[in-house]
Image (spheres, coloured by chain):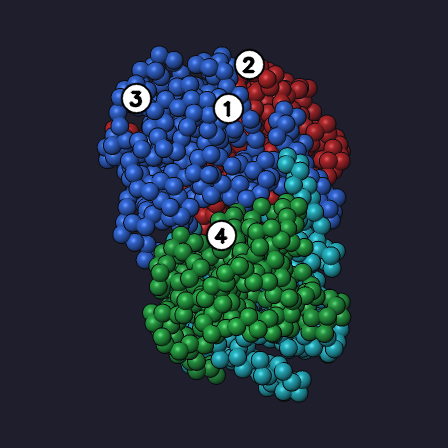
Chain colours: A green, B red, C blue, D cyan
Amino acid sequence: MMPFTPTEMMTIAASRALSNDDVCFVGIGAPSAACNVARLTHAPDITLIYESGTIGTAPEVLPLSIGDGELCETAVTTVSVPEMFRYWLQGGRISVGFLGAAQLDRFGNINTTVIGPYDKPKVRLPGGGGAPEIATSCKEIFITMKQATRGMVETIDFFTSFGHGEGGDHRQRLGITTKGPTLLITDLALWRPDPQTKEFTVVSMHPGVTRENVQDTCGWKVRFADGVEETPAPTELELTTLRDLQARTQRAHGGKKGN
Amino acid sequence: MMPFTPTEMMTIAASRALSNDDVCFVGIGAPSAACNVARLTHAPDITLIYESGTIGTAPEVLPLSIGDGELCETAVTTVSVPEMFRYWLQGGRISVGFLGAAQLDRFGNINTTVIGPYDKPKVRLPGGGGAPEIATSCKEIFITMKQATRGMVETIDFFTSFGHGEGGDHRQRLGITTKGPTLLITDLALWRPDPQTKEFTVVSMHPGVTRENVQDTCGWKVRFADGVEETPAPTELELTTLRDLQARTQRAHGGKKGN
Amino acid sequence: MAKFQSLKDAVAENLRDGDTVAFEGFTHLIPHAAAHEAIRQGRRDLTLIRMTPDIIYDQMIGMGLAKTVIFSYAGNPGVGLLRRMRDAIENEWPRAIETVEHSHAAMANAYEAGAAGLPCAVFRGYRGAGLKDVNPAIKSVTCPFTGEELAAVPAHRPDVSFIHAQKANRRGDVLVEGIVGVQKEALLAAKRAVVTVEEIVEDFDDLHPNLCVLPHWTVTAIAHVPGGAHPSYTHGYYPRDNAAYLEWDKISADRDLFTTWMKANVLDVSPEVFASRVEAL
Amino acid sequence: MAKFQSLKDAVAENLRDGDTVAFEGFTHLIPHAAAHEAIRQGRRDLTLIRMTPDIIYDQMIGMGLAKTVIFSYAGNPGVGLLRRMRDAIENEWPRAIETVEHSHAAMANAYEAGAAGLPCAVFRGYRGAGLKDVNPAIKSVTCPFTGEELAAVPAHRPDVSFIHAQKANRRGDVLVEGIVGVQKEALLAAKRAVVTVEEIVEDFDDLHPNLCVLPHWTVTAIAHVPGGAHPSYTHGYYPRDNAAYLEWDKISADRDLFTTWMKANVLDVSPEVFASRVEAL
């Protein structure tokens, strides 16, 4: 087994959750790496969509922004941003939406808007961008984040995007017909919502991770599934693919600055 | 003076009402000929838009349909039909819309839907197409038709598109801010709405036409403006341009049939 | 995922009696070959959606396939009336049909809303117009900011849409170019989408990034039918057969002539005939 | 009708204190040169609309031009936070600003509705999300056919929009290609539209008919500013200056450093400097 970092494990675990038939709405950072590792390994025909309007992209390097030129150059087609949100996202054509979080609660509700009160924030975060509608229009949502008690919290400061709300059938009660968060991929574990309560439950821990590691980095009392599995370690192919992608990306984006 | 037909006079009179800065929503038939004669004579920079999505077209021959290939080939750009109706027509970007009529009343209300009752029509006409929204979204409307008592009627059988309704400020009362019909061009005369009542009033008669000719071919009692003018006869340039256009069109569309 | 198959199989698998169906194409790219295949397969009780019913629906209505027609302009463009559709409305021949009539703006917006997954389209329309008194599918909503009353119509959500396009590539992506009409919207609004194409090419690598390409996973079936739009046209392949449109005015004027023509030119032939029809154009 | 003029004149004639203005470009084609000219001319009390405020609004906010910012994602894409915008919100430096926050879907739909001449945009959005509790500009309408509650937001109708594009021709038609973003909508939604371009060419005769071309009569002013999107990019001309985006994180972290940088790189230079900035990329 090649040695690997927790972040690499997280990215590779996320990539494994994707299949050849998926149509993914990709964010920047870990989701982008995961989606492209999937494309370069077991899911060569996966469709990657970035909200800049690029549909079916196959970038050689990871984009720094969601609107990098290479996304357009390698796309099947590039549409306007209103069309992206109307026909493609709202139209219900996306199978998996990836979201990250500054704060996350046990029901997959996400805050990326403010720390503190909205009107007088302690920290003004970037805000939701596409997330409020990604969270409800994609057939299902995968969340990726590194575990930390200040990120995985009992109560989020702002509902940037809706996961399972208060849990149970809260989505259905709001008339939302999509599944919402079905998978949380952290640097330590894989979590899936309990079928009834919708509370995220640890179903698999990454190699070498203990229950204490998971609980110590999570702000709510963690539930573990019966028979928690061990996430298979990254294969050599997965790790090499990810590292090559990141090395190519580094070279491409480390280019010289304009005058 | 070259001899000319009443239809030629109608087309040329309509073309004169257009200027270089106009953005015209063009129908098929007489309006299309008028718009293109204007473009080929005094208004070379006029913008012609056909509802097929072709913006700024300059066809060499008149299209048989509003979606002929040449409209696209000579256009500044070709957009989708939903965009045409949303951004370009509803967006308020069209200065002049041309409409024809099967039945027309004195207030510029138009019927192209049915003769007889809607549910049991004596004649089922093609219907409105773009007309209902052209009539209210363009800054002003020009109507062209050949005069006949069965066409210019006291009461139309169906309100396909709204002109001045019952006259007066009826448009404003419906919240419509555009001018509506400002000019009726027939084969005998030019008509403009009375500033107060909005009833179409003859302001100019074509050469050789008498008041009796106008009244005999109109189903309502005709009002004549103080000091009715004589429409200047077509110039040689206008007539030649129209006839050349029609001859080119004839040759182009008279082509052989597929097997 | 797009399946490459014969037009016969694509129609048989995707069009059922009683379906709501759109055959779209705005003057350009009208899918005549697909409609003829539907006629040969004898589908019944269809609800036909199309902005301009045109010759294509005149033929389907005249052959008795239609129960309802949702439309906005029932003319033979540049020629005159649709005589088979009139005969069905005025005289119930060969059967009575229901009509649901809209404006072009309403129809275009209804396709757009269907593609956008919305239940209805909202636009500024029908002000002072008579259709809203005779079509109960025309309602209104009030802008919560200005109080303006806007028109609302139900989104089009066909069971299946048929379009004709220039090209597919081997993966099943489809290119539509020129006058693109409402085809993208009609396809994305539908549960199933069948596309006939002039040509199948290896890949689309040389295309400009902003062209209208429908990814393979939005398409149910693709059939290779050169000439499949005739007597409509395909930009870059063959021109509109204007003479055929003029001729239709005569053929459709008489029930017997119509019936004989349909037998000889539709019922007794197969989709391959379309390629030869456009050869001389 | 498009008027060809210097960027200085185009900004002076079209942007006034107190205006509602959009500088659009979605990662690609961000009109930095036009924003710098607005900063040099010292406009005040602007309501700035933009999906992703980005470096361009971070600079305008930090220089005190903004009264209100209407936005949906206030980050430095791929890098982090917008430190000048944060400083204005958290510490009212250099002045307090009001924020009106939406989702991307709402902003895109609001531009679309503006271009379409509608008073509001209707879409399926904000379900379960917190923004509708803090932004009174988020309301709802009910679908008259299904009873579904849909989100409604006011259409964007800027007094003036600024975009950067690849090319204009001599008539003043403008070509935007690649990632086209919301630029067409931002331009058509505005009362006045100013476009900076990389290049002015004789005509557009060789363009594919379906490209995004804005006819000259939709454009108020065109200024020729090569490199005018830097550090954003222009597809076909120069790449994104990723290093400049990373560097901005440091410059914007400190008020003095920011002020010094703005003087040296914005206040004391002219639009011609943009051409040289992209030379080495």
Q: Secondary structure at mark 1?
A: strand
Q: Are marks 3 and 1 in contact (CB under 8 Å)?
A: no
Chain where mark 2 sits: B
Residue C210 falls left or right of residue B108: left
**Mark number, residue A94:** 4
Residue A175, given in percent of the width and then of the height, sits at: 63, 45
The residue at the point 28 percent across, 44 percent down is C199
- Where D64 falls versus C4 (above or below)? below
> Which three-letter amino acid code belongs to the residue tagged 4?
Ile
Residue at 46 percent across and 15 percent down: it is C95
On the question of residue B166 being in view, the answer is yes
Residue holding disc 3: C267
What's the chain of the residue with tag 4?
A
Q: Tag 2: Cα neighbours inside 10 Å, few (<14), some, or many (≥20)?
A: few
Image height of C145 relative to A68, above or below: above
Q: CA distance from mark 4 to mark 2?
A: 50 Å
